[in-house]
Image (cartoon, coloured by chain):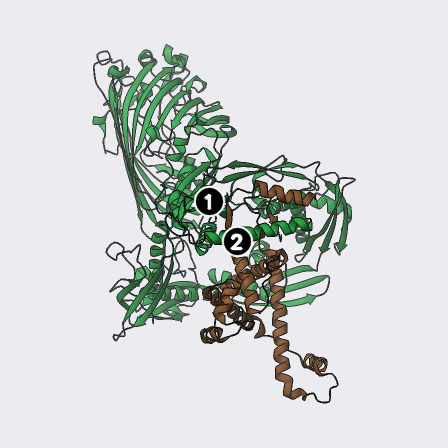
């Protein structure tokens, strides 16, 4: 009851007729993340992962955290000077967009259903490719996988299955998968380090009663 | 938060988003910002936001506007709201500004640490963004520094003093320190073989003493020093831990000492002092014995001995003993025969004269100053590199320099000759210069003389010079991120290349405003006149730092910090911050010293000693200064000096920027002085002066003065003919208007080697402005300095002084008429206004103020109406860089009248009826001499020994002054001693 009263009270004091169009929701280093960016991220992730749009506060929070990670990685890409975009691959994947199906919908239909623009979709794709390129160059390239790990993974995948292909046949595939896994783990470690050393601040809505900025990390 | 509330808030957000979607595309009827006072001006806000009245509202524009505004760094939070109105939509930007660091103060701590150390420890820089993390980190660093200084549990409270108009916030850290922890127990580890008591005694870490960082560091240094004295050169002392015991307010230390072995280094084969050995063998300084350092020591010793003439020296080292307790190293030196570098030749130099190359060489032929010359293999190698570098920087990229050494020059054993053979090779010349990228700020070759211009020799040094010039111009024009690249490519002509410069200009920054803070007493116009930055102008680094320098030059600020506000932000208009710290306005200084001089005037010295006698007098000085009077940068000072020989008080009021101009300075002074500089009399002088100093240019200055002084002479102290006493003892009131022109083009005012120094001083004393004697005074000096070679300087000066009285006051009854041989000083000139000369800073052939006419009976100097001095000095180094020598010749004198100036070098004399003689003093006295100079940071300390070739004879009196009055004494001829010894500070001229 008390909560309902509070919510009604909020409605009452909410500036009549004034809508929040957009606002800063977080700071990563010296860059801001906007509410509209969180919203777009949520929609694009749902579209490219072919799942229903979930706009709950929990989902928004997770989208925001992923955006924060993306900003941290982008800052590393900029510092490294690596040109991680593969122009030809981007071109190919962009062409594929028009032919792709998104949970049974065509690309234009999916754009409309998820409430995003073609430019936003292409931008999302470009970013994903850039991150993949960076991870591959920065983290995958130097990863050595020991033979015992390959064998252990083989055993995990195929156990004692008599129909399992011989190890040498699948060695490269297993090695590649392990390398990718290791690279992602290294990336996650790096992102954790960056989170610990970068200024990341959650910002309150200015229309609400003033509170101190909430810090996510030291 | 209750779940129902979360749902409702989420619903609110959704509802708001749904409502916002309906506003998309509606025309914007109004754009507002809240609060009204924004960090950016209206023009910048309009430029950065993509939302304008009359245009349709787009969500993409809203997002880009927020991003652009945020990227300026001026905002901490931004929210955009909209509501339907008048058929369109009214948009409001709700903003929260960022704050930037202004002053940082830490209060409540008794040093150490000092307030400045505490402020530095916070790592908060002027103009940086204030964030909660930065403030927390500042507190953490303060705690660390305080803990290092014995304050283990301080309370730190942070107060903010905000200045919304400039978005600055002063952060004040109020600290409650509690008691400082003291030294507690000490746990020693390692092999020091010291008792705890002994360690405490050496380090000074006695129980009960405050445990501060400086004390700990000093203790560690003292322990190391103690081990070094006992030969343990590898001793290591480290504080491994500090444990604070809050119950007892004590800090217990864990100290690890590794004594290491005793290190003994012996030198065989050459007598080398311990001090030199420690200087050249680096194991002592490094505290480590390893092969590399020992080899370096051998190389250093070899170079040292070669520089002493042992050109064939060999130095080997051996570790003869190495245990845990002792390491013994022996350096075996075979010096070989001592030789000298007799001849140095440069061959093959066409582009440069050989002398130009020779000036750059470290090798030296033997000379008077360096009997063996200077030679070693490393010096030879460095000279080869130096010559090659000289050629390469002038376009001779393929230059080759080889050397030829003759060990028996001219067939004489022990004589070395070195020849440098230079093969210059072809020179590379710039065919033409291409410059790209200068778009907004082009530097025209007609305005800037690039070193790599067409036809000039090509070298990387020239490119570096051009780079520095170009970037300096860009930085000054506000292009703080400008960068420079260059490349070179050959042409068809093998001796010519094309040089290309590419400039990336970056963004141009401009000054939004200058913000000055930290001053309480100083008036703002005084500060603003020193600032060279104008709002709207390009942000010039030179102007920033020049403004800082000008503020320091006011002499009223102990600290002037300058920085950009929000340096990381994207906005191109920046506030330039000046944070000032005013000096303490009152300053009191005490000093002591002693004078030792051949002085002593007045009746304390017998009338039979006109040259005076050596006197020693302790001296006390007191100075009181009040800075920044009335907040205008003016200064009031009182200086007093008291000794047996002098009592002086000087009051000054100084306005360093008269009428607000940097080129005008005003000084008003009052002086009371009873110096006994002249042995002939003791008097008191009270003087007031008003002076304007006008700086025409860097080299030229004008002084305009009105001086009023009253001199009273104690009649009982006059050591002159009784006949002259009544006239000479009258108090004299002199008032002068005078002007001085100074032109100083010396390279170094304290110890010049080049340039010139000229002054002309004209003064008029007249009854019209309060003077009793009427006279005209001229003083001129012309000094020039010639750098004859790297080590020789020739300095000369000519000084002329003329005093010409007018009017007939005193002329008609001149009591001195007939008393002098030749001309006598004009009686219209009072004693106190005449020229007196002689001594360390004028004619060194005379004792202090002993030149010129003398009383015909007592022989005491009575000054003259003219003076002339010509001095020549040859200055040269003697031992190393600090001790130099001087050969000098001084010629001149003080003359009775301007018309009596003479270059005659013989003194005339005439016998008198009573059997004595009369001497004339109007002739030129010559003195030659030798001096030593010891260079100090405040100028050279000087000892001069002069021999006067024709110092004057004079008639002196044997007896007391009473005998003189009664006529019962006797006269005797005396002579100014030919040998004079002078001790002083600074060059003579």
User: In the rendered structure, the residue with mark 2 lies on which chain?
Assistant: B
Q: Which quadrant holds residue A178?
A: bottom right
* Image side of residue B72 versus residue B748, left or right: right
Give the CA distance from mark 1 to mark 2.
18 Å
When the figure is inspected, residue B385 is found, relative to residue B708, above or below; the finding is below
When the figure is inspected, residue B643 is found, relative to residue B219, above or below; the finding is above
Question: Where residue B933 sits in the image (x, y, percent)?
Answer: 42, 43
Q: How many numbered dots are placed on residues in this image?
A: 2
Which chain is painted in brown? A
In front of the other: B181 or A18: A18
Instruction: Identify the residue at the far front of this view.
Output: B87
Report whether residue A37 is seen. yes
Disc 1 residue crowd, few under 14, some 14–19, many 20+, Cα 10 Å: many
Q: Which quadrant of the figure contains the N terminus of chain A?
A: top right
Q: Which quadrant holds residue B402?
A: bottom left
Q: For mark 2, what is the residue?
A: B18
What is the secondary structure assignment of the residue under circle 1?
strand
Disc 2 residue crowd, few under 14, some 14–19, many 20+, Cα 10 Å: few
Mark 1–mark 2 contact, CB under 8 Å? no
Question: Where residue B524 sits in the image (x, y, percent)?
Answer: 41, 31
Q: Which mark is residue B486?
A: none
Report whether residue A82 is seen. no
Q: Are marks 1 and 2 on the same chain?
A: yes
Q: Which mark is residue B92?
A: 1
Question: Where residue B958 sits in the image (x, y, percent)?
Answer: 39, 19
> Which of the two labelled residues, at mark 1 and mark 2, occupies the earlier sequence position?
2
In front of the other: B969 or B57: B57
Question: Where residue B70 sits in the image (x, y, percent)?
Answer: 48, 50
Which chain is painted in green? B
> Residue placed at 67% from the left, 88% from the top?
A165
* Image side of residue A26 versus residue B960, left or right: right
Between marks 1 and 2 in the image, the one whose residue lies nearer the viewer: 2
């Amino acid at each position: 009851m008390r909560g309902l009263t509070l919510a009604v009270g909020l409605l009452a004091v909410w500036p009549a007729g004034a809508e929040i169009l957009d606002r800063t929701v977080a700071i990563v280093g010296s860059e801001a993340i906007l509410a509209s960016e969180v919203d777009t991220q949520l929609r694009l992730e749902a579209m490219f992962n072919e799942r229903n749009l979930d706009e709950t506060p929990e989902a928004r929070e997770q989208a925001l955290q992923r955006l924060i990670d993306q900003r941290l990685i982008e800052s590393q890409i900029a510092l490294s000077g690596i040109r991680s975009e593969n122009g030809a691959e981007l071109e190919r994947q962009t062409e594929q967009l028009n032919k792709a199906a998104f949970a049974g919908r065509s690309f234009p239909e999916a754009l409309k259903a998820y409430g995003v623009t073609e430019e936003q979709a292409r931008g999302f794709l470009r970013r994903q490719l850039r991150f993949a390129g960076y991870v591959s160059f920065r983290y995958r390239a130097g990863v050595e996988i020991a033979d015992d790990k390959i064998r252990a993974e083989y055993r995990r995948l195929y156990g004692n299955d008599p129909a399992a292909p011989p190890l040498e046949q699948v060695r490269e595939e297993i090695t590649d998968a392990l390398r990718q896994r290791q690279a992602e783990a290294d990336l996650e470690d790096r992102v954790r380090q960056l989170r610990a050393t970068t200024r990341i601040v959650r910002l309150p809505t200015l229309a609400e009663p003033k509170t101190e900025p909430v810090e996510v990390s030291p | 938060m209750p779940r129902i509330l979360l749902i409702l808030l989420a619903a609110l957000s959704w509802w708001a988003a749904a409502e916002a979607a309906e506003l998309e595309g509606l025309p914007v009827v109004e754009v507002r910002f809240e609060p009204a006072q924004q960090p950016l001006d209206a023009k910048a806000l309009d430029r950065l936001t993509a939302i304008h009245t009359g245009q349709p509202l787009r969500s993409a524009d809203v997002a880009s506007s927020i991003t652009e505004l945020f990227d300026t760094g001026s905002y901490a939070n931004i929210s955009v709201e909209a509501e339907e109105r008048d058929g369109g939509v009214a948009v409001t930007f709700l903003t929260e500004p960022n704050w930037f660091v202004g002053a940082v103060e830490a209060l409540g701590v008794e040093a150490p640490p000092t307030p400045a150390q505490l402020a530095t420890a916070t790592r908060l820089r002027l103009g940086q963004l204030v964030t909660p993390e930065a403030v927390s980190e500042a507190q953490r660093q303060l705690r660390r520094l305080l803990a290092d200084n014995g304050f283990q549990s301080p309370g730190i409270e942070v107060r903010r003093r905000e200045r919304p108009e400039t978005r600055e916030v002063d952060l004040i850290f109020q600290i409650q320190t509690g008691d400082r922890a003291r030294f507690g127990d000490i746990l020693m580890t390692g092999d020091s073989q010291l008792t705890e008591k002994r360690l405490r005694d050496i380090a000074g870490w006695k129980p009960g003493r405050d445990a501060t960082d400086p004390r700990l560091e000093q203790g560690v240094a003292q322990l190391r020093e103690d081990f070094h004295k006992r030969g343990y050169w590898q001793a290591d002392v480290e504080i491994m831990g500090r444990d604070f015991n809050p119950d007892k307010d004590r800090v217990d230390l864990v100290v690890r000492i590794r004594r290491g072995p005793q290190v003994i280094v012996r030198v065989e084969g050459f007598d080398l002092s311990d001090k030199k050995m420690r200087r050249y063998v680096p194991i002592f300084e490094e505290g480590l014995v390893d092969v590399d350092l020992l080899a370096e020591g051998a190389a250093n010793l070899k170079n040292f001995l070669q520089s002493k003439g042992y050109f064939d020296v060999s130095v080997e080292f051996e570790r003869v003993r190495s245990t845990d307790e002792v390491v013994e190293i022996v350096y075996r030196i075979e010096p070989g025969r001592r030789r000298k570098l007799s001849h140095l030749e440069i061959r093959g130099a066409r582009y440069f004269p050989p002398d130009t190359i020779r000036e750059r060489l470290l090798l030296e032929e033997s000379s008077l100053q360096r009997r063996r010359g200077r030679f070693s293999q490393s010096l030879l190698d460095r000279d080869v590199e130096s010559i090659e570098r000289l050629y390469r920087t002038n376009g001779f990229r393929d230059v080759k320099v080889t050397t030829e050494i003759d060990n028996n020059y001219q067939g004489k054993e022990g004589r070395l000759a070195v020849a440098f053979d230079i093969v210059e090779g072809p020179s590379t010349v710039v065919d033409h210069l291409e410059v790209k990228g200068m778009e907004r700020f082009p530097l025209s070759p007609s305005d800037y003389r690039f070193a790599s211009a067409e036809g000039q020799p090509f070298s990387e040094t020239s490119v570096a010079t051009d780079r520095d010039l170009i970037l300096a111009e860009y930085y000054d024009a506000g292009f703080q991120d400008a960068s420079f690249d260059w490349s070179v490519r050959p042409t068809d002509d093998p001796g010519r290349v094309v040089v290309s410069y590419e400039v990336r200009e970056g963004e141009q920054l401009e000054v939004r405003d200058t913000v000055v803070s930290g001053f309480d007493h100083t008036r703002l116009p005084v500060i603003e006149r020193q600032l060279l930055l104008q709002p709207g102008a390009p942000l010039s680094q030179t102007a920033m730092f020049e403004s800082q320098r000008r503020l320091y030059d006011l002499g009223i600020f102990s600290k002037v910090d300058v920085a950009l506000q929000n340096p990381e932000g994207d906005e191109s208009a920046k506030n330039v911050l000046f944070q000032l710290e005013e000096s303490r306005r009152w300053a009191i200084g005490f000093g002591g010293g002693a004078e030792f001089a051949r002085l002593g005037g007045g009746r304390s010295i017998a009338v039979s000693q006109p040259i005076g006698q050596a006197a020693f007098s302790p001296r006390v000085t007191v100075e009181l200064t009040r800075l920044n009077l009335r907040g205008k940068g003016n200064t009031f000072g009182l200086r007093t000096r008291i000794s047996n020989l002098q009592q002086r008080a000087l009051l000054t009021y100084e306005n360093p920027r008269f009428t607000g101009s940097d080129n005008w300075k005003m000084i008003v002074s009052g002086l009371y002085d009873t110096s006994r500089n002249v042995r002939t009399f003791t008097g008191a002088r009270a003087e007031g002066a008003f002076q304007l100093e006008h700086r025409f240019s860097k080299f030229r200055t004008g002084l305009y003065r009105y001086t009023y002084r009253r001199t009273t002479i104690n009649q009982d102290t006059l050591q002159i003919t009784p006949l002259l006493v009544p006239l000479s003892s009258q108090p004299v009131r002199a008032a002068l208007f005078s002007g001085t022109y100074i032109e100083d083009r010396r390279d170094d005012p304290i110890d010049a080697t080049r340039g010139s120094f000229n002054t002309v001083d004209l003064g008029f004393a007249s009854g019209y402005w309060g003077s009793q004697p009427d006279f005209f005074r001229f003083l001129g000096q012309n000094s020039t300095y010639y750098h004859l070679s790297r080590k020789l300087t020739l300095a000369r000066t000519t000084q002329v002084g003329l005093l010409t009285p007018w009017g007939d006051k005193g002329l008609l009854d001149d009591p001195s008429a007939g008393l002098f041989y030749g001309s006598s000083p004009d009686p219209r000139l009072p004693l106190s206004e005449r020229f007196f000369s002689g001594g360390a800073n004028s004619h060194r052939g005379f004792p202090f103020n002993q030149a010129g006419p003398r009383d015909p009976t007592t022989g005491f100097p009575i000054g003259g109406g003219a003076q002339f001095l010509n001095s020549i000095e040859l200055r040269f180094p003697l031992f190393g860089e600090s001790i130099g020598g001087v050969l000098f010749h001084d010629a001149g004198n003080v003359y009775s009248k301007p018309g009596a100036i003479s270059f005659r070098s013989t003194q005339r004399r005439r016998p008198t009826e009573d059997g004595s003689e009369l001497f004339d003093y109007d002739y030129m006295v010559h003195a030659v001499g030798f001096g030593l100079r010891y260079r100090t940071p405040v100028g050279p300390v000087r000892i001069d020994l002069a021999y006067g070739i024709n110092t004057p004879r004079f008639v002196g009196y044997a007896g007391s002054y009473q005998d003189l009055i009664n006529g019962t004494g006797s006269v005797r001829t005396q002579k100014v001693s030919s040998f004079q010894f002078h001790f002083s500070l600074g060059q003579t001229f």
